[in-house]
Image: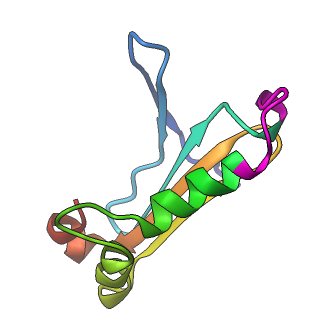
């Protein structure tokens, strides 16, 4: 079994990007991991994490108020997710390559 080579890029600010490009596969799948989770809350109330998650998913912007951004993604068959676990925060996005210009 041949394991594909994963490309790794590092930014000066400590950000790391790991990629496994595949020109033949029609779906783009990306996950952003932020090394901050529930364990980092200290004495803060855990509901603050839920507030962050809900505001990201449902508050929107001027161009995409409320759930409009999620509706646009869903109309294209794309998926968007935001979750926070004990050690990390994860933002995920998947979409068809043909829709890249509309998603990005």
> In which image quadrant can residue 73 be found?
bottom left
Above or below, 40 against 45 in this view is: above
Looking at the image, which residue is at 45% across and 69% down? 58
In this view, the residue in front, 3 or 75, is: 75
Looking at the image, which residue is at 57% across and 51% down? 52
Q: How many marks?
A: 0
User: x%, y% of residue 97?
Assistant: 28, 70
Q: How is the image coloured?
A: rainbow
User: x%, y% of residue 103?
Assistant: 24, 67
> In which image quadrant can residue 37 be found?
top right
Q: Where's the N terminus, which quadrant? A: bottom right
Q: In the image, is 80 to the left or to the right of 100?
A: right
Which residue is most to the bottom?
75
- Stretch in magenta: 39-47
Which residue is most to the top?
12
Is 45 within the magenta? yes
User: x%, y% of residue 24?
Assistant: 35, 68
In this view, the residue in front, 85 or 56, is: 56
- Evaluate whether residue 25 shows in this view: no
In this view, the residue in front, 19 or 67, is: 67
In this view, the residue in front, 52 or 73, is: 52
Is 41 within the magenta? yes
Above or below, 20 against 58 in this view is: above
User: x%, y% of residue 104?
Assistant: 22, 59
Q: In the image, is 18 to the left or to the right of 26?
A: right
- Evaluate whether residue 17 shows in this view: yes
Looking at the image, which residue is at 30% across and 85% down? 76
- Classified by dominant secondary structure, the portion drawn in magenta counts as loop
């Amino acid at each position: 079994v041949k394991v594909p080579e994963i490309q790794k890029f590092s930014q000066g600010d400590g950000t790391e990007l790991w990629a496994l490009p595949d020109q033949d596969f029609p779906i783009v799948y990306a996950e952003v991991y932020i090394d901050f989770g529930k364990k980092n809350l200290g004495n803060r109330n855990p509901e603050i994490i839920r507030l962050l998650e809900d505001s990201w998913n449902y508050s929107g912007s001027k161009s995409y108020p409320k759930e409009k951004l999620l509706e646009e993604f869903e109309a294209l068959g794309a998926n968007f997710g935001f979750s926070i676990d004990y050690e990390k925060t994860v933002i995920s996005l998947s979409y068809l390559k043909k829709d890249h210009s509309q998603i990005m």
